[in-house]
Image: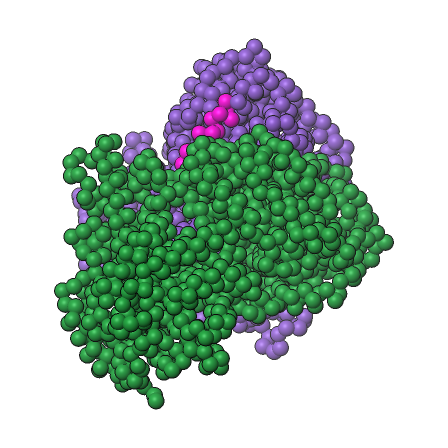
Chain colours: A purple, B green
Amino acid sequence: MSVEISTLDPQVIERGKQFFNSITGEAPSVFNKGWWTGKVMDWAMQNEDFKVQMFRFVDVLPYLNTSESLSRHIEEYFAADDSNIPDVLKWGATKTGFGGGLVAKVLNKTIRSNIEGMARQFIIGQKSKEAVKGIRKLRKDGFAFVLDLLGEATVSQEEALAYRDGYLEVLDAIEKEYKKWDGLDTGGELDWGHAPKINVAVKPSAFYSQSKPVDLEGTVEGMIESIEPIYKKVMSMGGFMCIDMEALKYKEPTVEMYKRLRKKYSDYPHLGIVFQAYLKSVDDDVSSMIDWAKKENLPISIRLVKGAYWDYETVIAKQNDWPVPVWTHKPESDMAFERVSKLIMENHEICHYACASHNIRSIASVMEVAKALNVPDEKYEFQVLYGMAEPVRKGLRNVAKRVRLYCPYGDLIPGMAYLVRRLLENTANESFLKQTFADEADISTLLENPELTYKKLLESKPAPKADNRVRLKGVDGELEPFNNFPPSDFTIKEERDAFPESMSKIRKDFGQRYPLYIGGQEIITDDTLDSYNPADPSEIIGTVCQAGVAEVDKAVAVAKDAYLDWRNVEPRERAQYLLKAAQYCKDNINDLSAMQVLEVGKQWDQAQGDVAEAIDFLEYYAREMIRLGDPKRMGNSPGEYSQYFYQGKGVAAVIAPWNFPLAISVGMVSAAIVSGCSVVYKPAGISSAVGYGLVEMFKAAGLPDGVFNYTPGRGSVMGDHLVDHPDVSVIAFTGSMEVGLRIQERAAKVHPGQQHCKKVIAEMGGKNGIIIDDDADLDEAVLGVLYAAFGFQGQKCSACSRVIVVDSIYDRFTHRLKEAAESVKLGPAEDPSNYMGPVVDKAACQNVLNYCKIAEEEGKVLVKREAPLEYREKSGCYTPMLIVEGITRDHRIAQEEVFGPVLSVMRAKDFKEAIDIANSTRFALTGAVYSRSPKHLDLATREFRVGNLYLNKPSVGALVERHAFGGFKMSGVGSKAGGPDYLLQFMDPRLVCENTMRRGFAPISEDDDWVA
Amino acid sequence: MSVEISTLDPQVIERGKQFFNSITGEAPSVFNKGWWTGKVMDWAMQNEDFKVQMFRFVDVLPYLNTSESLSRHIEEYFAADDSNIPDVLKWGATKTGFGGGLVAKVLNKTIRSNIEGMARQFIIGQKSKEAVKGIRKLRKDGFAFVLDLLGEATVSQEEALAYRDGYLEVLDAIEKEYKKWDGLDTGGELDWGHAPKINVAVKPSAFYSQSKPVDLEGTVEGMIESIEPIYKKVMSMGGFMCIDMEALKYKEPTVEMYKRLRKKYSDYPHLGIVFQAYLKSVDDDVSSMIDWAKKENLPISIRLVKGAYWDYETVIAKQNDWPVPVWTHKPESDMAFERVSKLIMENHEICHYACASHNIRSIASVMEVAKALNVPDEKYEFQVLYGMAEPVRKGLRNVAKRVRLYCPYGDLIPGMAYLVRRLLENTANESFLKQTFADEADISTLLENPELTYKKLLESKPAPKADNRVRLKGVDGELEPFNNFPPSDFTIKEERDAFPESMSKIRKDFGQRYPLYIGGQEIITDDTLDSYNPADPSEIIGTVCQAGVAEVDKAVAVAKDAYLDWRNVEPRERAQYLLKAAQYCKDNINDLSAMQVLEVGKQWDQAQGDVAEAIDFLEYYAREMIRLGDPKRMGNSPGEYSQYFYQGKGVAAVIAPWNFPLAISVGMVSAAIVSGCSVVYKPAGISSAVGYGLVEMFKAAGLPDGVFNYTPGRGSVMGDHLVDHPDVSVIAFTGSMEVGLRIQERAAKVHPGQQHCKKVIAEMGGKNGIIIDDDADLDEAVLGVLYAAFGFQGQKCSACSRVIVVDSIYDRFTHRLKEAAESVKLGPAEDPSNYMGPVVDKAACQNVLNYCKIAEEEGKVLVKREAPLEYREKSGCYTPMLIVEGITRDHRIAQEEVFGPVLSVMRAKDFKEAIDIANSTRFALTGAVYSRSPKHLDLATREFRVGNLYLNKPSVGALVERHAFGGFKMSGVGSKAGGPDYLLQFMDPRLVCENTMRRGFAPISEDDDWVA
């Protein structure tokens, strides 16, 4: 039987009108302006800035444990401009004379209790007892329930287990009395049809701290391990368990887990899953699920929701330059909801349906479709959120009976996060509830078929705002504005499969000899060096020819010669070679990434990130050179024409590190090349195979011979010689402070025959600190610190090696950090489930072990984990993951760069002292702050003096342009890589001024300052 | 009797109409499209680009002596885009198959002869014989004449005398026959009334090569010396001499000369002068003259013209930011012409009037006013240009009889320059002739009262084009866009008088002790050094305290402390201090300039230029910091906000030179300060009194104590110490290469306790060349080279020390250069008539003398001039002005910086070799090219690789912003001073990235990349 919603429309609208009639005069309590919540909501809807501040304040509120802290935050969030708290916030506080200390305290108390009251409105109880009492009452009113335990983000196994235990506890509480409950419709064991009285919802990611899309199997197994006991308990009580759907990145493991549990307990039918209509993939998601059920012949239950992470999904997609996975117009979600509801109900024989929406149009449509399809009553039900949309639930109860309330319970800390989501939902302009009950929109508009609404919307929509970023003219027309190359999206199977494929492909070529590449010629040397896999040193990546003094002389001579022509190539054309090289990298990104996993031990995502960064450098510097390449007219005097433009300085020696083996090499090399310099490139010995990628890339780009020359070599043999060479004009170096300072000192000496003062661009070390403020969101801070300290084994100049924790949050933070660190997996980067692997080579290993010793002597071990024995037995370059506390600024471990997985925890009495400690090294590279105090964030912006400071983000992962990278003090003498001033360092500015007046006559141009 | 032109308007228009009727069907030959000239004019009027190229080509034509050169230029000027010569130019050449060598030759020949023919149309003859023949013929046709000898610019005494002799020669020729001529109207001795048959016009500036406004007396005397013999000859023949008016800068000496001659030969009435109606000052100019005549009771004669240098005067005024001295709307000049004509004729009893206009409305107005005022016929006459406006002259002859033709005669080289002016006049949109005869405008429009035309023009005029330069927000509202501070305008008496006044004022304070200034405290030291006047070492400017190591330590400590606060001051506020300091300089510019004249021996204009440059640095860097100071958002990802901004590096040591003692000091210091650095400033010992000006300036600006510290000292005592100091983060140095390299080398060594890698900004030496191409405009090239080589005694890093001359023009150029050099005056800078003075001190003197010896050994002396004995006897630091030729690139004098008045002349076989020679040093600072070959100018733009290249301008005199200054190779490691990248060197970029997403919710801003 085929049913078309459009033909049902008159009935749908009629039913909707009846629905509205049945609730005339009712309004959800949240919009009741007679009360604090309603007033605040009203104010938030009128004032976007207040809304942002209010919701952020709600978020931080549970962390404000002292009166001082509460007071300060109220001031910072709401009184920034005129030191007046908005009246709406004061509502309910004593009416007389605000401002004094005592009165302020009253105010603070009122605000806190008002907000907590607001939260409680959406939460059925904080403890299991309360929750049980609440649902008992609901059932009395004729509503079924589904219970959901609120939780913070799960950063460790300990937290996952605690969360599981929370469910078991509430189930125990219910167990004691549920048998006394009468079925709602039936009065029997079930509420209606085959709906059990007990119903719980679980959010899978909260049950496993190591969930990640790249590790599908591990994630599914990890989730099941914690959830299965709950399900067993539920089954033992004859209850229903619904697996909620969270952010998109968990969709695939969630579906997979559902299938496994459903199949494992195939005789037990009461297991549900949720799909989100706002996903563009929802039609496929649901049909696949139904197909699976049919194939397996297993009845299933689907709750369909619109989806609660729209902002998050959109922001993440935009930040990563991934396709936006959600519908970008609200009516599209509504359309999908109706469409997929119909699909589910068409399959009601295999699939029970829970319609979860507050939208009366959606509900009416479901009811009419159900009717048209003759769906039996017990095959579908309605769900609404506890504390929301009371008129809707009442109306539903009137017309549809089978109404279930989604009931969160739990502590106020996670409750506040839940509250923020609910507030957002109620205040969004496109919210049906807001339109209905706050904006009092016309009923016929509200009941309109969303297809029609969508059509009207598209028609009335203003032309999309022009992207007003400047578009540069390239060789072949206009270039797209710069965008960072997207990171891998491991929710996509093809992207997960690419790594193993590429690794096995490139492994076939392992052991080959890499020649030098000078002036377009491959050159073989007797001296060679092997590059090996740090996880298994017996695996030789390749044998790399080593340049000596003679080869360096040759390379410089070739480069000097090439420079004379190259500097004359138009900037736009030089840029074109970079764009071609970028294309080569895009075409070969998997192989290039895989090589890094094996040669230097990068985790998959980080290896891909390194190649993506290389692409970004190429794309960005190409555009930068075009931008800078057009001569700039100086002044506008008539009779003269002055042009300011740039010329490449000459031969650039690029001395690169191994830790971002492609990205930093490509960054320095491509900057030099596009600026009109020619290059002699010395990759790090450890990563010379990755470095050889540059040869292939520039060959593919067709770069003229001699402009780029590849000369790996032993620093002790040819390093100084290259730096001292009189024909080298630029030295671009990234590496340790010691080597950087040595290069600077040597390069400042002018040698016979030298025609150009050498420019040294040196990016050196760091001793980067992350500050944890007392109001930091620990869900994010713990994971951020862990990643910044141990990602790629801490072998980044941006890595966090000091975490500076404000005293009052010290214990909470360190406990969670320790547990989180204990939860991650250690082992080769090749296996994406591992969080941390071996350091880059044996020498690095020894160096890190030395520092571990120092750290253990100077501080107290908080975490010390070794990689599993099986890996260490292969002589892999493993060092422990080490976290020590009790470190103060005078300790060596607080001052010296380790370049490995060693993290010092330092205690600060307050935020100001934390900044002092953070600044107390010779370095000034990166840093981060986790805080939700606007003033502290401002203070850090000014006073936490490092090149790259991140607020509520880890200190690593700088992206080209967005996070232009580089520091000062002893961290660098260069300008920021991937930033707007970087290329200038490779060029000399020139000015040509022409007197255009001849015989008293000067042509006057448009932009001359001429008489009117 | 009072007459109003407006009431006469009906008669004026009626008379104008009759005038037009009388010439119906006639057209000036120049517009006759049946001929080459007419076609070219027509094309030029339609095509602005062609017009520019055509007029420029006419200008260069006389220099194109070979067929190859002619061919090349035709190609370059006219076939740049599509290698097709416009058809119009080919007219008259053989019609078949252009392109081949032979045919091209024909074409070239045709073009040359056509242009020469065009020139001849405006010139009565090339030789005096021809000229006499021509005027004889004119007289036969009833026209009187005034004879004018064409001339190149006069760059030397030799040329001035030759020019004078040219006049005497033609007068001799006339003398032989003029007695045979009948008076035109009278048939007697005179032509009409009391108008002599012989009439010559002289351009005063051509008679004295050293004319300059600053030296009024010398200029007048110099002019009279050459002109008086001509006048005597004219008087002896009973003739009339008219003193022409040229560019505004010669107005005052011209008037003065007229008065002196008129008074000296008071009995002889036939001396006339010209005034220009386009000058806004014309009413005052003419009334003053008439008042003078009345007072002296001396009859005078005035020719009134509209004025021929409108473009020039406007361009110069705009370039110098002086008020535009000419009317900017054509009808205003016409109004002034009628108004001043009336004024003259109202005074006809004392003043004879020559009305020189081709504008029939102007003529008609003069005729009607004359009639209304009852001006006797013999008291006014009409003048028109030979070869122009034939119908007008014919009409005038018909109605007014007394018509005199202005007849240039002379060589085609100056003739071409004259031709360009005439062509411009004929093709200007507002030209009456063009409107009348080419555009065929309506007669009533042409005859409209210019007051009415002006009114209509103002009404119909579009709103003035908005100045779309970015306006920055300062502390007190918007700042005006940057403009260079104007140079002194020495045509203004007050500006001339200011220097002697200021010099005598500051002399009263000479001999005072200058303390150090550290942390706002004056500090006296035992060690002191005297600063003296290089023109008279016995004159002590002041006694300067000298900092030692202890004072340096103290200054650095104070500066380090001040830095910690200063870096936090908002960029906009820091900028405000610079603007205040600039105001101090403006308020005290005369004293500050005068100090330089006496302490370092700068010529007035250059001393003022130095202070003006200091002001420019302050104003420019203030704006630059505001521009750079606003944090820049990086990327536009939603959910994150990245800001890129800058922070001052720390303590800056500024080590300054003496040659631009205020400008370069202020430039480096103010850049450091505004960037957020604190400064320890070491002025050069020689110019420490000027350097003390910075103390006063920053005191006046209210700069916080310790941000600027003044520590003069002996380099040998405290120089290295300052450079090595671990707390110095930036060293800004300008001076010699030797010292600059030493600083770089020392600064690269990191010392214990040092927290910041030192940044060295070193501007070093130059060995700057000027290339003279074979088609260079020698009028400009000779003066340009002379000024670049010997201005301020060649003591500029930008000074020209090599002039590289293309072989084929070598003799002409060097001859004129030699003669020009021999013509200038040598002596103290205090006397503005002197072109060159003493070098800066005794040590410099010795150094230059050593190089003179080398130069004389290596080359052949072309010019060697000593200052007059009287100056040398005072022990003034005089060295010879030396020009040697025969220098090749291997000579020491071609490679080493002299920093004094020594110029090497080098011969190049062609332009390409000239560029090779120019580039053949270790330096790359400035350079210049004099050429009129578009291709060679392009080639130089690319291949003459210096920091500042000037085309058809001297290599010196860089202005802030317009000529952002600085070089590369061994000339500098800094970016360009006064340029857009300069401040970056004093700052470290910082990036702060905030993750703005909390709980999945991010505020979305306008410029986010958000979903549509």
Q: Name the magenta segment's main secondary structure.
A: helix
Q: Is residue A765 above or below residue A95?
A: above
Q: Is residue B543 above or below residue A889?
A: below
Total labels: the figure holds 0
Which one is nearer the viewer's eye here, A394 or A196? Answer: A394
In the current view of this chain or complex, which residue is farthest to the top? A526
- Residue bounds of the magenta highlight: A558-570
Q: Is residue A117 left or right of residue B762?
A: left
Which one is nearer the viewer's eye here, A943 or A628? Answer: A628
Please give the name of the residue rendered at 25% of the width and 35% of the height, measured from the top-left corner: B105
Please give the name of the residue rendered at 56% of the width and 48% of the height, measured from the top-left corner: B822
Magenta run includes residue A569: yes
Q: Is residue A1006 above or below residue A440?
A: above
Q: Is residue A785 left or right of residue B599?
A: left
Q: Is residue A616 visible?
A: no
Expressed as whole percent of the image width and height from the top left, the position of residue A926 reads 60, 42
Look at the image and tell me in which quarter the C terminus of chain A lies.
bottom left
Please give the name of the residue rendered at 42% of the width and 25% of the height, measured from the top-left corner: A704
Expressed as whole percent of the image width and height from the top left, the position of residue A62 reads 59, 56
Which one is nearer the viewer's eye here, B698 or B240? Answer: B240
Q: Is residue A432 left or right of residue A76?
A: left
Magenta run includes residue A832: no
Which one is nearer the viewer's eye here, B731 or A275? Answer: B731
Look at the image and tell me in which quarter the N terminus of chain A lies.
top left
Q: Is residue B375 visible?
A: yes
Expressed as whole percent of the image width and height from the top left, the position of residue A115 reads 54, 62
Expressed as whole percent of the image width and height from the top left, the position of residue B104 reads 24, 35
Please give the name of the residue rendered at 78% of the width and 61% of the height, measured from the top-left corner: B511
